[in-house]
Image: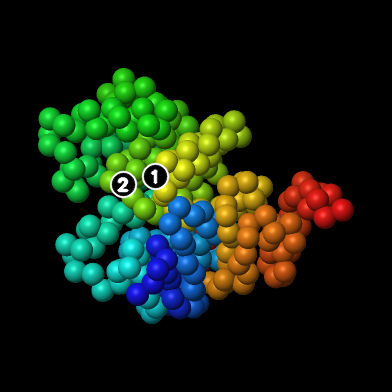
Amino acid sequence: MSAHLLDVRDLGKRFSRNGRLVTALDGISLTVARGETLALVGPSGSGKSTLGRAILRLIEPDRGEISFEGKNLLGLNSADLRAARARLQMVSQDPQAAFNPRATVARVIDDPLRIHGLGSRTERPAMIARLLERVGLSPDLHRRAVHEISGGQRQRVAIARAIATKPSLIVLDEAVSALDVSVRGDILELLADLQRDENIAYLFISHDLGVVRAVAHRVAIMDAGRIVETGDARTVVADPQSATGKALVAAVPKLRYRAATEKA
Ligand SMILES: Nc1ncnc2c1ncn2[C@@H]1O[C@H](COP(=O)(O)OP(=O)(O)OP(=O)(O)O)[C@@H](O)[C@H]1O
Ligand SMILES: [Mg+2]
């Protein structure tokens, strides 16, 4: 048993595509501590989303182990898996694709409460109002359809839905990538507030090294289904050791400049 919140060991996953096997995860091991943000970066197709989805048990890995809150996630019966799922949530880039766009905001947040048996039918509207306030939205928004609200508001609703079941870990898969810069900053601030208040850990999948440097405690760099480098986020972004890390940083001129001036 692991003392870490999340402990992934030697995870492997291959997909068959057009009769060919694609190795998406090739022996991934990592840990996440309670209240920690681990960023996952890497080129497109390196396996980041597959890793996030495997941890959420949205896909079954071919091999390896995942321990979450001290339990073997891959060996749980369906009742225990359901309980674990309440503690393990996800926010993706496009919540509109994840929700029924015609559903109301209230419905989207009510679903996890109902599924996990949190609150009675009469208690849940007040719970939904509190969750909306917690993510900086007016409770009056609850009647609106998710397709009617702005992208930033929708991402706040996705976060409200994710925290409804009091998770200890949220996988954020490019969760702020589609937002424009000022909205992105507000959402990152909200995520930081929630982490500080609720001690939530984040697996923060991102291609934006500037954001990673600002929000993550540690970073893991993936390439072709493997982790090629891990370390303190600022240190790795300032001075990556792996070829993949160097290439990622070199692709962002501003970061290269900042790393150079900070070293001087
Ligand atoms: N359901 C699937 N069926 C077949 N192949 C898949 C499937 N999901 C992912 N793959 C393949 O697995 C590899 C890893 O994909 P993944 O989506 O995890 O990469 P990623 O790092 O998230 O990329 P991006 O930065 O573009 O989001 C890719 O080669 C991808 O084509
Ligand atoms: Mg992805």
Q: Residue 144 vs residue 135: left or right?
A: left
| CA neighbours of label 1 inside 10 A, class few (<14), some (14 to 19), many (20+) | some
- Is residue 202 among what the camera can see? yes
Q: Residue 202 vs residue 133: left or right?
A: right
- The mark lying in front, picked from 2 and 1, is 1
- Residue found 28% across the figure and 37% down from its top: 109
Q: Secondary structure at mark 1?
A: helix
Would you say the residues marked 2 and 1 are in contact, meaning their CB atoms lie under 8 Å apart?
yes
Q: Of residues 189 and 93, which is closer to you in this image? A: 189
Q: Amino acid at mark 1?
A: Glu
Q: Position of residue 22 (x, y in %)?
A: 48, 74
- Residue found 57% across the figure and 71% down from its top: 227
Q: Secondary structure at mark 2?
A: loop
Q: Decide: is 182 above or below 65.
A: above
Q: Of residues 175 and 219, which is closer to you in this image? A: 219
Name which quarter of the figure residue 96 lies in. top left
Mark 2, residue position? 166
- Residue found 49% across the figure and 69% down from its top: 30
Q: Amino acid at mark 2?
A: Lys
Q: Of residues 97 and 151, which is closer to you in this image? A: 151
- Residue found 53% across the figure and 39% down from its top: 188
Count of residue discs? 2
Q: Quadrant of the N terminus?
A: bottom left
Mark 1, residue position? 198
Mark 1 Cβ inside 8 Å of ligand 2: no
The Cα atoms of the two marked residues, 2 and 1, are separated by 8 Å
First along the sequence among labels 2 and 1: 2
Name which quarter of the figure residue 6 lies in. bottom left
Q: Position of residue 108 (x, y in %)?
A: 28, 37
Q: Decide: is 249 above or below 23.
A: above
Q: Residue 40 vs residue 3: left or right?
A: right
Q: Position of residue 94 (x, y in %)?
A: 44, 43
